[in-house]
Amino acid sequence: MGGCFSKPKPVEVKVEVMAPDKEKEREKESLSPNGKVSPMSPCKANGSTKHIEERPITIDLYQNPKDMIEMAVCHVNELQDGQMREVDVACGKALLIKERGEYCAIGHKCPHYGAPLVKGVLTNGRVRCPWHGACFNVATGDIEDFPGLDSLPKFQVRIEKEKVIVRASKQALQSQKRVKWMARCATLCESSFSNTSVLIIGSGPAGMVCAETLRQEGFTERIVMCTMEMHLPYDRPKLSKSLECQAEQITLRSKEFLSQYDIEVQTEREVLSVDVKGKVVHFKNGCRMEYNKLLIATGSRPKPLQCQGADLENVYQLRTPEDANCIAKLANDRNAVIVGASFIGMEVAAYLTDKAHSVSVIGIENIPFRKVLGEKVGRSIMKMFETNRVKFYLQNEVSELRGQDGKVKEVVLKSGKILRADVCVVGIGVVPATSFLKQSGINMDSKGFLPVNKLMQTNVPGVFAAGDVVTFPLAFRNNKKVNVGHWQMAHMHGRIAALNILGKGIEINTVPYFWTAMFGKSIRYAGHGEGFDDVIIQGDLDERKFVAFYTKSDEVIAVSSMNYDPIVSKVAEVMASGRTIKKRDVE
């Protein structure tokens, strides 16, 4: 990486850079664990003697010849090594890639949110999404880093008479996503049966990816995922960005999908305690479940507001789709007060500006996001909110909530200011949801986080942890133990945990990546900027087109941007390669 970054030139970071096989049909009486089974078909705690199902030797991506189309998309010499091009293939598009003199073609849209991958970053056999950092193997289309659950379709490429010809399935061109091959449970058992091979506590991305990875690796024993939620796993980041979305609109996997691959989800199941010696989990409803391997992925819970009136109606901590829907309904043409200038709080404030009569944000800092994004970037974002008529009451706290007929009506600040409020949203931080583990023997630090090693293992053999609840060694920061509460990171934690539940010995090595969206503008962020001592900004903060490099001593440890794609993904690739970006390279 090198060169001089100066306005107005764009920033440049130099970087060297199938459809599943048809599954075997079961006997007609063979149903998934979520369905009915004969009481004469018990399930042993360790499952059947066959733990891993071998993948098919070949996977026929194009089983229906009538569904196939092919087209010459360019001359063989049109692309140089390291180049990508979005090409038309009859009824759809494909991403054509040339690397090391060879052509390949995969789906052109990221399956996560549909980002155009041609605008992403191609490095050493994989392409990274420009929006949220997901990575895909260009030879197979398989997802290698997250967010998202699906892989890309892989298309056939051949050279004929100096033309590059792409052969593809119409269905794959239209869907632009592919589910990797997955095994199913080899032994049927009733959903009420009290033992399982793998028990996953929590239904967020860590738990979901863990379950799918186990099946993708050929695991054929029982998998149970239990959650306090009343819904199947869903895309939680959308709650604060789209308050009126319904649970069924943001579900990660359908009930039918989970049933098809024998991933058993038990909703409204709160864990009371874990007995690691007996390998038993006790639930609040009096039930118990024995396990062979355990993954703890319970995420975090919001900090409550500690003041008089905090228990009034219409005071919310955004946690569920129902919370989001109620906030949107109550704020319509009324007064909304957001307590806490956190990412969630600010996203809610941004969403409500064109719906509420007034939106007020209360924060203890003098500038929103100062600790994460720096003072200058934080001030720029604050101006964007003020332009959209959001009022800030910073370096302030709530003294009291006052109500009428049991519903909040006023928010009293410690400064003495009184704000009208028909709905109050509290976003003042989170704590790990690990209180049920206090007497378990599983190590917890003073803040309630679970320390794990590079394999996502806790101090207890057979017990793994992932997601917001853990501190883990971050490879690119010299294995510093950190807590990273990002959606992307939880996905990767789940994958690594699954591989090591199977004894693979795979260590975690990924770069944190997150994003936020406000007023149609997205901020991307990669790295881990804790402890940064300087921020180098290129571009124009007033125009909301910039990149900010966060440095510690002479090293870049994180980057953020707005309207500067794919700079964050480029830097993430440099960090992922193990190379160091020096401060002088970006000044």
Image (cartoon, rainbow, N blue to C red):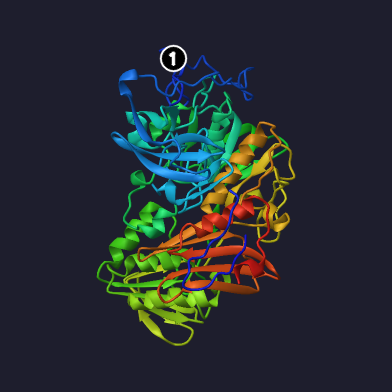
Instruction: Kindly identify the residue that appears in the image at 51 percent across and 59 percent down.
Output: 567
Q: In this view, does 146 lie to the left or right of 69?
A: right
Up/down of 135 relative to 61, above or below: below
Instruction: Kindly identify the residue that appears in the image at 70 percent across and 61 percent down.
Output: 446
Q: Is residue 54 left or right of residue 444?
A: left
**Residue that label 1 marks:** 25
Q: Position of residue 326 (x, y in %)?
A: 33, 59
Q: Position of residue 370 (x, y in %)?
A: 54, 74
State which quarter of the image contains the N terminus: bottom right
Q: Nearer the viewer, residue 144 or 278?
A: 144
State which quarter of the image contains the C terminus: bottom right
Up/down of 316 relative to 205, above or below: below
- Regarding residue 531, the answer to whether it shows in the image is no
Q: Position of residue 570 (x, y in %)?
A: 54, 55
Q: Nearer the viewer, residue 278 or 329?
A: 329
- The amino acid type, in three-letter code, at marker 1 is Glu
Q: Image quarter for residue 338?
A: bottom left
Up/down of 431 relative to 260, above or below: below
- Regarding residue 158, the answer to whether it shows in the image is yes
Q: Given the current orientation, which residue lies at the most extreme bottom position?
A: 416
How dense is the environment of label 1, judged by Cα within 10 Å: few (below 14), some, or many (20 and up)?
few
Q: Where is residue 262 in the image (x, y as percent from the top left)?
A: 49, 27
Total numbered circles: 1
* Secondary structure under the numbered disc 1 in the rendered image: loop
Instruction: Kindly identify the residue that appears in the image at 46 percent across and 72 percent down.
Output: 8
Q: Given the current orientation, which residue lies at the most extreme top position?
A: 27
